[in-house]
């Protein structure tokens, strides 16, 4: 029952709460955490590369593994979970980018990091040249269509062409064509 | 996949064929023919080497930022484990052997764990006190308020007062000074306050008072019983009160005593309706499997 406090405010009486029990993780939780250990870094790299901030990427990765837990909890297919995880991450990242209402800043955060960690083996002139080359490379990369960029990132994470085609929802031929086209563009970084 | 140009001695490999060969995406027989061509064709070998150089350049650029994430891996892992523990209670096949009180206790346990880890995770990568080995207290917050700090408080109002349009439309912004006091009371001096919303336990739409006994820092991040779910309950109770289906003191008491139990009672469900919870966005889009 409410009790009268002061200034016409009714304050409810304080209550006690039972002590919290300790709970052991289930085998399914352990399995998901194991996947997390294996895939967190690649997923962070991928989602940052397609334009998420580090903080958003970390949150998306958490959501991916919550989704994986639910997927497995419902006894859904375990066929190629590696590609499944990337596909969920890709879709959630695109949603997040849309909700952020801004264009992806592809590899910009990486650019800052690369520039802040110059190769110590190079002399000052070589560092400048190396930095300029990285800038050109990045410019070429950013000029690629987004789908081509995604193909490259996913390939860099070790996905096979068939897996990439499923993650992005495009044909196998489109994947190989995209990767070939992108590499030929990147090859021109030295003016070749 | 099409693989043309292998039959004539002078026909070079296309760019796509070079990529397919490099990535071991060709069939065995096609790859054999391509390698045979490469063995005798300096032009294609040079093009292949240039392509490998482009791959190496790209991979170096792509991996350049990966080291920055390594410091927070342990915190992220612990956060995931806590969130999974919270989800454990919502196995779709599970028949509940527990009383409602025991279930609520378990929600509280899992949520306390989740929020504690979240607070630790928020501090982990950037807090120099942690990296230098100094002890820093980890703040634990439940998805339900501390009943000693926030028992609930309501203004003396009747049904017609709370259902008046002017009352419903009025803003209920909590002054910054009061919010800081609430955070301090809950020991939240060192966590990101943007992760929480200082919320009324009894919503002003039900006569809840702007009194510190009725305010608590509600976490946004809880997977199941989060602020969005509580908002849905508040709307529901307001409608029920204004429709005359529930009297105002009952609504106030129920939400103040245990808002999760109240949600279950008024929505007739043990889990949040998907439209109310952040879980609604988790459906996996990989239907091909």
Image (spheres, coloured by chain):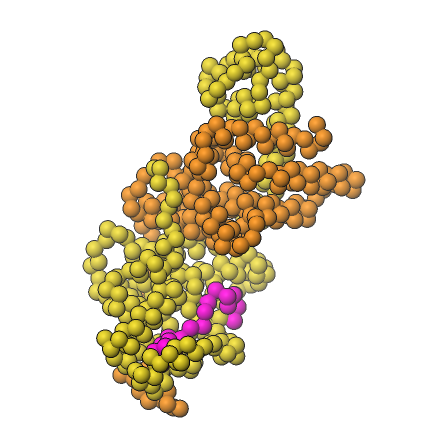
Chain colours: A orange, B yellow
- Residue B232 at x, y percent in the picture: 34, 67
Q: Is residue A109 left or right of residue B110?
A: right
User: Can residue B240 be found in the magenta stretch?
Assistant: no
Residue A91 drawn at (x, y percent): 45, 45
Q: Can you say whether B44 is above or below B8 in the image?
A: below
Residue at x 30%, y 73% (from the top left corner) = B239
Find residue A7 and report its image quarter.
bottom left
Along the viewing direction, whichever of B143 and B134 lies nearer the viewer: B143
Q: In the displayed orientation, state which residue is furthest to the right.
A: A125
Residue A121 visible in the displayed image: no
Q: Position of residue B176 (x, y in %)?
A: 52, 77
Image: B9 above or below B146 = above
Q: Residue furthest front?
A: B165
The image quadrant that residue B222 belongs to is bottom left
B194 magenta-colored: yes
Image quarter hosting the C terminus of chain B: top left
Residue shown at the point (36%, 59%) measured from the top left: B277
**Residue sitting at x 53%, y 28%:** A177
Q: Is residue A154 visible?
A: yes
Asked if residue B115 is positioned above or below residue B58 in the image, the reply reads below
Tag count: 0
Closer-to-camera residue (B278/B127): B278
Q: Compared with residue A77, is residue B164 higher up or lower down, i.e. above or below? A: below
Residue projecting furthest to the bottom? A7
Look at 30% across and 42% down and name the residue there: A76
Q: Which residues are magenta?
A: B189-207
Is residue A172 found left or right of B66 in the rendered image? left
Question: In x, y percent, where is residue A191?
Answer: 72, 30
């Amino acid at each position: 029952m409410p009790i009268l406090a002061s200034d016409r405010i009714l304050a409810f009486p304080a209550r006690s709460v039972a002590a919290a029990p300790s709970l052991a993780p289930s085998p399914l939780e352990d399995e998901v955490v194991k996947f997390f250990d294996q895939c967190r870094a690649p997923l962070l790299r991928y989602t940052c590369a397609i334009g998420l901030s580090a903080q958003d990427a970390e949150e998306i990765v958490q959501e991916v593994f919550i989704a994986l837990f639910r997927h497995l909890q419902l006894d859904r297919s375990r066929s190629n979970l590696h590609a499944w995880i990337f596909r969920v991450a890709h879709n959630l990242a695109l949603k997040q980018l849309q909700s952020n209402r801004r264009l992806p800043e592809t590899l910009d955060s990486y650019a800052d990091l690369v520039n802040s960690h110059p190769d110590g083996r190079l002399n000052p002139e070589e560092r400048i040249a190396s930095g300029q080359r990285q800038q050109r490379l990045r410019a070429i990369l950013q000029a690629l269509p987004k789908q081509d960029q995604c193909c490259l990132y996913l390939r860099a994470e070790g996905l096979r062409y068939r897996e990439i085609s499923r993650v992005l929802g495009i044909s196998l031929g489109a994947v190989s064509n995209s990767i070939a086209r992108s590499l030929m563009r990147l090859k021109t970084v030295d003016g070749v | 996949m099409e693989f043309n140009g292998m039959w004539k001695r002078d026909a070079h490999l296309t760019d796509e064929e070079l990529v397919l060969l490099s990535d071991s995406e060709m069939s065995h027989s096609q790859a054999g023919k391509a390698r045979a061509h490469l063995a005798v064709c300096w032009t294609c070998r040079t093009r292949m080497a240039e392509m490998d150089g482009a791959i190496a350049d790209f991979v170096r650029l792509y991996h350049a930022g990966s080291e920055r994430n390594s410091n927070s891996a342990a915190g992220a892992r612990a956060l995931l484990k806590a969130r999974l523990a919270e989800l454990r209670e919502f196995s779709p096949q599970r028949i509940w052997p527990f009383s409602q009180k025991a279930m609520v206790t378990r929600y509280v346990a899992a949520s306390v764990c989740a929020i504690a880890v979240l607070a630790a995770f928020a501090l982990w990568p950037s807090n120099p006190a942690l990296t230098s080995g100094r002890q820093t207290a980890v703040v634990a917050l439940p998805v339900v308020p501390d009943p000693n700090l926030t028992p609930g408080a309501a203004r003396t109002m009747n049904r017609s007062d709370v259902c008046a349009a002017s009352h419903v439309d009025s803003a209920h912004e909590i002054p910054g000074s009061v919010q800081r006091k609430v955070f301090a009371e809950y020991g939240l001096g060192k966590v990101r306050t943007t992760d929480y919303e200082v919320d009324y336990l009894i919503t002003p739409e039900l006569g809840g008072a702007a009194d510190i006994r009725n305010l608590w820092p509600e976490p946004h991040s809880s997977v199941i019983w989060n602020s969005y779910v509580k908002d849905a309950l508040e709307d529901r109770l307001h409608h029920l009160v204004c429709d005359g289906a529930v009297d105002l003191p009952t609504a106030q008491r129920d939400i103040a005593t245990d808002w999760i139990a109240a949600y279950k009672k008024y929505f007739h469900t043990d889990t949040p309706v998907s439209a109310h919870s952040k879980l609604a966005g988790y459906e996996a889009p990989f239907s091909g499997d």
